[in-house]
Structures are given as C-alpha cells and as structure tokens.
Image (tube, helix red, strand yellow):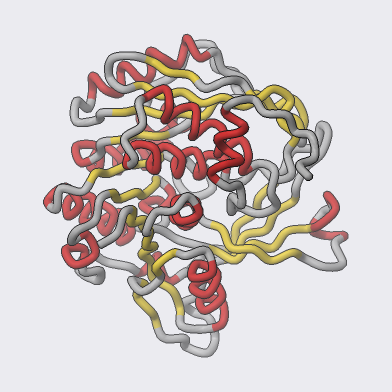
Amino acid sequence: MYDVVTFGEAMIRLSAPEHRRLENATKLDMEIGGGEYNVAVGCAHLGLKTAWVSRLVDNWTGWVIRNKGREHGVDMSNIEWAPFDGVGLERNGFYHMEVGVGPRASAVTYDRGHTAIMNIEPGVIDWKSVFEGSKWFHVSGITPALSDGAAATTLEALKAANDAGVTTSFDLNFRSKLWSSEKAQATTKQFMPFVKVLIGNEEDFEKVLGLKAEGTSDDFDALDPESYKSVATRAVEAYPNVTHVGTTLRVAKTGLLNDWRTLLYDGNEFYLSRIYENLELVDRVGGGDNFSAGVITSLIEGKDPQGVVDFAGAYSALAHTFPGDVNWATRSEAEGAMRGESARIKR
C-alpha cells in the first residue's frame, strides 16, 4: 500500500524569528515538526508514497498537524483521534525554538506533557492493515521515550512489520529531556532484533546502545569517521539482523556554521559522503531526519551504498538551508549538491 510508513509524535513548533530570544520576541513563526513526521515528509517530497501513523487530540492543533501533512503529500488517514475534553487534560504537543548564532547555540524547550500519543496502547492501531503491501517502516527512539504505552506500541509495530516482510529502520534519536540513558538502553534492546537499518549519531549510539566512539568530545561537537567505524562494526556484531548502519557527522563551529558529512556501513564496507564544509545554517533541526529520508529513499530505489550515502548526505545538508524541520530541497538540487555544483544564482 505504502512505500514508507512512519510512527511517532508531531508537534506544533513556535520559533522566535530573527535570532531573538523567546522572551523578547514580538511574534512567533509556526511550523510542524517531529522526527518520524519529518521523515515521512522528506520521503514524500522525493516521490514516495508515505503514511504517518499517530494519535492526536481532535481539536485545532490536531487539524493543523493533519492538514500540513496532507499539504506535503503524506497520507494522514491512519491517525487515531482522541476526543477533545474542552480543557486540555489530553492535548497535542508544542515545542519552542531559539535559533542560535555565533557562540550561542540553538535551544529547544518542549511543552509535550499529557499528549495524546502518550496514552497510546498496543491494539489501537491495525498494523496488519497498515503494512499490507507496504515496503518500509520507520520509527525513532523519541516515540518509545514518551511513555510505556508508546514503547509497547513501538515494539508491536516493529514485530508486525517484520511479520509482514516490511523493511524496518530505527533512528536511535536520544533525547535526554525525555528519558535517561539507562531507561533508553533497557527499552531499546527489545526493539533491536526487529531492526534492519540502524541510524544515529555518536551520542545516540553511546546513550542508547552503550557503544562509545573513541575520540568523541564531551559535548559531541566533533568526530573522526575512523573512530566511528568500530561503533558500526560492534552494532552489527551485536545485532546480526542489522544490514546497514548510518550516521551523520557534524562539527559545530558556530551556531550557524557547521561541517557536515554522512557515513554508511553495509556490513562489509564503509562509505562516506563528501564533506560540506562551512555549511551555513538557516535551521539545524531535522538534519538527521532528512538523512534518514535520503537513506530510505535510496535503498528502496536500489542505489549502491556509495550512491546512498552521497544522496542522503546532500539531501540532509540542504535541509539545513530552510527554516523549520521540513526539507524543501528537490531531488535535482540534492543531485547537484552531490556533484559539487556552484551555488551561483540560477537564471
């Protein structure tokens, strides 16, 4: 039925424009964002038939999330709707963003307590129907971090995808504001036998799987690709069902200037994209999600490993050039960035 199905939470994002603090902003920009939602949108923009599965409260915030997903070409028909109680005891989440500049880092604060998806339980979603005829299922570590019910539903979905012969990917996506490393490791171990493609950065692998890359700084602001290879190798040794491991490599020079590169391991060889040096950031949120979208799309389309990492690297690099979580880059722009085409104005 679908090329790609994703499952997770989406939130309304309120951002302070012009690099302002939230406390001194006179207006806020509204976008929609969420790890698995971003992946579904990215894959849809690249031409795949995608669906996003979640649970939302049936009020204006839920309608905005649904409508924006539809605008991007994502099937939003598999949402479980919770009735609005009139006072918000169950609600849809928000997050607030300050885009940093110079030595000031970007900052995110969440307002996502008591959200509808936190109350999801196994048996609510008809996964057999969702996965019938589908090719790929993607979820991240953010979803099971929301509640025990969301974690149990994540496991239910991964098992159902495996039973249906659907390829699965899992982005480790550790969020310290949602759960501890100890809880993340204990929970994620249940998912790993059902994961084919594993994605995460250096902090994710350490905090969620206990696999530390040598040479990593305390704030994870730089990483030698060579040292990361041992992490990927150990992941595949520990979980032989994993066929690919992918990661993004970021050096944050300033709040708006990063170096960016991506890596893919296919169980035999390591492949690196070109380095996008001094990448000028409009917004860094969603870079990893759009790497996932690039990897998923490329693997579905049968690209060779070098082609996968090159395209995913370019697509995710371009994601940094747009405000909000969503990547508006086209396939042709990503292919041009892969080739190192000039950024001169196109007329």
Say whether residue 289 is left or right of residue 340: left
Q: Residue at x 60, y 66 (%)?
A: 12
Q: Is residue 244 above or below residue 329?
A: above
User: Would you place residue 59 above or below residue 165 in this image?
Assistant: below
In the image shown, does 305 or 196 lie closer to the viewer?
A: 305
The quadrant the C terminus occupies is top right
Q: How many dots with numbers?
A: 0
Q: Is residue 269 above or below residue 131?
A: above
Could you say where residue 175 lies in the image, as x and y percent from the top left?
50, 44
Specify whether residue 36 is in view. no
| Left or right: residue 271 compared with residue 169 | right
Report if residue 303 is visible in the image.
Answer: yes
Q: Quadrant of the N terminus?
A: bottom left
Outermost residue toward the left? 163
- Given the current orientation, which residue lies at the most extreme bottom position? 86
Residue 115 appears at what percent x and percent y?
A: 47, 69
Image-based side of 233 in relation to 212, left or right: left
Quadrant hosting residue 156: bottom left
Viewer-side residue, 336 vs 126: 336
Q: In the rendered image, which quarter is residue 97 located in?
A: bottom right
Q: Residue at x 19, y 58 (%)?
A: 133
Q: Position of residue 116 (x, y in %)?
A: 42, 71
Image position, residue 345 (x, y; %): 80, 40
**Which residue is depicted at the point 52% across and 63% down?**
72
The quarter of the displayed image where residue 276 is located: top right
Residue for point 25% across, 39% down: 195
